[in-house]
Amino acid sequence: MRLIHPAITRRFRDHAMPVGLAMLLVGALSLLLMAVLPSTRVAPIALLGLSASLALGVGCAMVLRALVRLRERRDEIGDDIGRMLAPAFDDSYVLVLAPRLPGVPDDLAALLVGPPGVRALIARRWQGRYRVRGRGWEYDTRSRAGWIPTITNPSFDADAVGEAVAHWTRTVVDDPQVTITPAIAFPRAHSRVVLEEPESEIVTTDNAPWFAQRIGRVQRLDPRRASRFVDAVLSASEMEAAETSSATAPRTA
């Protein structure tokens, strides 16, 4: 499988890591100066100690924040979806991670493009045990309450995203062979999903190979049509990224 990351928008840029590392460097230099100053220089040593404690504390906090944000960013980009699906599909498939298309909700996590057509994937990284019957979703409370309905319904969410992608496709790619099928991805092993004749397409860390084999039985797109669709997605994502960057860029008087 070929993985594609479209242009990342400005909103993903985070300066916390370089600033945090700079603060840690300042703190280390302050400690070094404290070590070389004579013990009789009480006032400078006290000031350097205060500077070192502040710099090290702020630097550690900013580096931690940057690491947390990096993990969130990887989730938003869909790296875990790529790790889950890549071993199950061959090079005739393309996975476009976190595409941004006009009129399509940001809930779109990825587009899986291959001979069977296009899968518009949403991602759910829920923890715990869930069950889907038809289009109904339930959560296992592991208590006397047993199974209870989930607050949101991934099947409805996936349908909304799939319809939006299909509408965008009709306006950009004039090809009736390009069919959009909504699907729900659970890319984390801590999501346990019991499938009881679901009406939606669901792929998990457990059933990814079976999912790939099942959808691969239908051949709708040849490489030329698939490539044209992917090119349209990348062009639209780049335009959306450019517009977002322009909207968020600081204005000077």
Image (cartoon, rainbow, N blue to C red):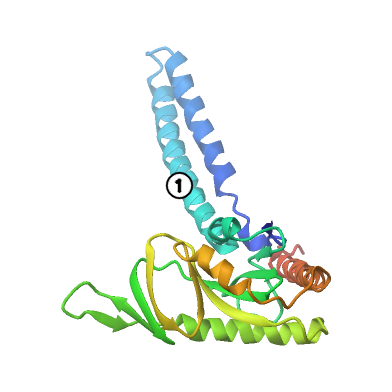
Identify which residue, 23 or 187, lies in the foreground: 187
Relative image position of residue 144 (x, y in whole percent): 16, 78
Q: Residue at x 55, y 77 (%)?
A: 183
At x 70%, y 82%, the residue is 179
Instruction: Tell me the quarter of the image containing the C terminus.
Output: bottom right
Say above or below: 33 vs 122. above
Q: Amino acid at mark 1?
A: Leu
Query: In x, y percent, where is residue 217?
Result: 63, 74
Quarter holding residue 9: bottom right
Location of residue 195 by image quarter: bottom left
Which residue was labeled with disc 1? 64
Judge by depth and name the residue closer to the eye, 242 or 190.
Answer: 190
Please say if 52 is above or below 36. below
Question: Splitting the image into 4 quarters, where does residue 142 fall?
Answer: bottom left
Please tell me which residue is depicted at 49% across the width and 44% down the height of the picture.
63
Please report the residue visible at 38 percent of the width from the left and 71 percent of the height from the top: 193
Frontmost residue, 90 versus 158:
90
**On screen, 103 above or below 48?**
below
Residue, far front = 217
Out of 75 and 253, give the one closest to the viewer: 75
Within-10-Å neighbours for mark 1: few <14, some 14–19, many 20+? some
Instruction: Pick the quarter of the image with the N terminus.
Output: bottom right
Specify whether 202 is left or right of 195: right
Residue 73 location in percent, x, y?
56, 58
